[in-house]
Image: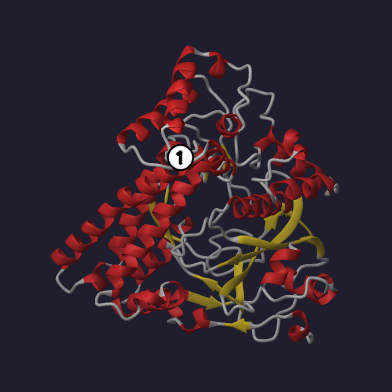
Amino acid sequence: MINNTREIGWNFNNSYAGLPKLFFSSQDPTPVRNPKLVILNDCLAESLGLDAQLLRSEDSISVFAGNSIPEGAKPLAQAYAGHQFGHFTMLGDGRAILIGEQITPEGKKVDIQLKGSGRTQYSRGGDGRAVLGPMLREYVISEAMYALGIPTTRSLAVVTTGESVMREKEQTGAILTRIASSHIRVGTFQYASSWGTVEELRALADYTIQRHFPEIEKTQNKHLNLLKEVINRQATLIAKWQLIGFVHGVMNTDNMAISGETIDYGPCAFIDKYDQQTVFSSIDRQGRYAYGNQPFIAKWNIVRFAESILPLLNDDQAKAIKQAENAIEQFDVVYHQKWLRGMKAKLGIISDEGQQDELLIEEILAIMEKYSADYTNTFVALTFEKSNDTKLFNSAEFKDWYKKWQDRIHRQNETKDASQELMRINNPAVIPRNHKVEQALKAAEEGDYSILKALLNVLSEPYNHSCNQGDYATPPSSNLPYRTYCGT
């Protein structure tokens, strides 16, 4: 235990440890040799009620490394299962330890998890460790997603361990401190359904409601309403992904958080050229998790969640199935509403012309795909009326569409300035360009963190549209396919 817990601001609760033992194993992190702080998220720390300066102390670095446990924390590894690329298997925190739940100054409860903190009973032969590049990658992408307005887990700190980790080659060991509303997953419910009793499943569902959806606690069928709430949050999340061109890369059910936050930044990336079939992950050879497939996969995962909680919906299985089916039908409705509203905002469309607006949106996306247009930069160019000398903007199809779009804008009662402002706040100037992320990670692995910090600074204000963002908005010069790896 460290002796200045209260000074730092740690204020732990351990409600997850109150669940049946089926769901976790008590587990301390494995100590490391010589931890050093690489990066600390000062703004996040302060919002959690932590003293950012004291978090740089040896005591705090010891906590981030898993060498010390703060007073009040009860470290544990969570058990869960999941469909990985469609195949069901038993899983669990094989290299992560939940050290506790921090109560923020606003009374919010968030998980503090150490990723890469050593073996657990769920490691399945793995070494329980992580390496520097992927941990920094999660730090960069999760913080960029937060700035973009996407619900996400966040990153508080990364430390190196002073130990090497063997992957394809010897690499620098590291541990990420991840912050999440919780780490309850679709796979957690699948685990309870497959290996637990109905009462254990009920305990998990009731805990989830209390933690994330307290407003439905006293409703008539709270477990059916839980399903509906999860559907709404997931449909909303995936719509936001699509609107910014984010490809998660590994949408297994164990990587789908019940809270509606993006979790697990393994082989993720952002599309440059607009293409519905875009796949970055080296292991997704069939394109299961391609950009255009993400809404369908999210719904597939929701079905797996619904299957897991059927016994809680109704004692009559046939009625339970019908209730679940009726709820799941709303996924497409919610997703389409959220996506359509977002796309209209990206084009400055404020009023509603129904099907005509959808056709206008579908037409520009089809033209962008035909001419391999850069997704982010095309919408920025439209926002500021700066059509570049590209195949897209010089095409007859685009010029015809542009006239129809301008006519549509002029039919609104709102001013053109109002439309442009709507576009400005919905079209980011910068995203984590894949080549820029790789450049920053490569330099960091060689000991130079300046490029990483400069990138994080720019990504923190994606809607700022300032002159210093120019270089970070440039697509890669190479046409070679970009590949990502799960990375550990």
Left or right for 403, reference 462: left
Q: Residue at x 42, y 82 (%)?
A: 20
Q: What's the residue type where badge 1 is placed?
A: Met
Is the residue marked by circle 1 packed among few (<14), some (14-19), or many (20+) residues within 10 Å?
many
Q: Is residue 487 above or below residue 109?
A: above
Q: Identify the colour scheme used.
A: secondary structure
Q: Is residue 254 visible?
A: yes
The residue carrying mark 1 is 343
In this rendered view, identify the residue nearer to me: 401 or 353. 353
Q: Residue at x 58, y 69 (%)?
A: 120
In this rendered view, identify the residue nearer to me: 83 or 145. 145
Quadrant in the rendering for residue 185: bottom left
Under circle 1, the secondary element is helix
In the picture, which quadrant includes the N terminus? bottom right
- Which x, y percent locates residue 294? 42, 43
Q: Is residue 317 above or below residue 50?
A: above
- Which x, y percent locates residue 26? 56, 79
Quadrant in the rendering for residue 221: bottom left
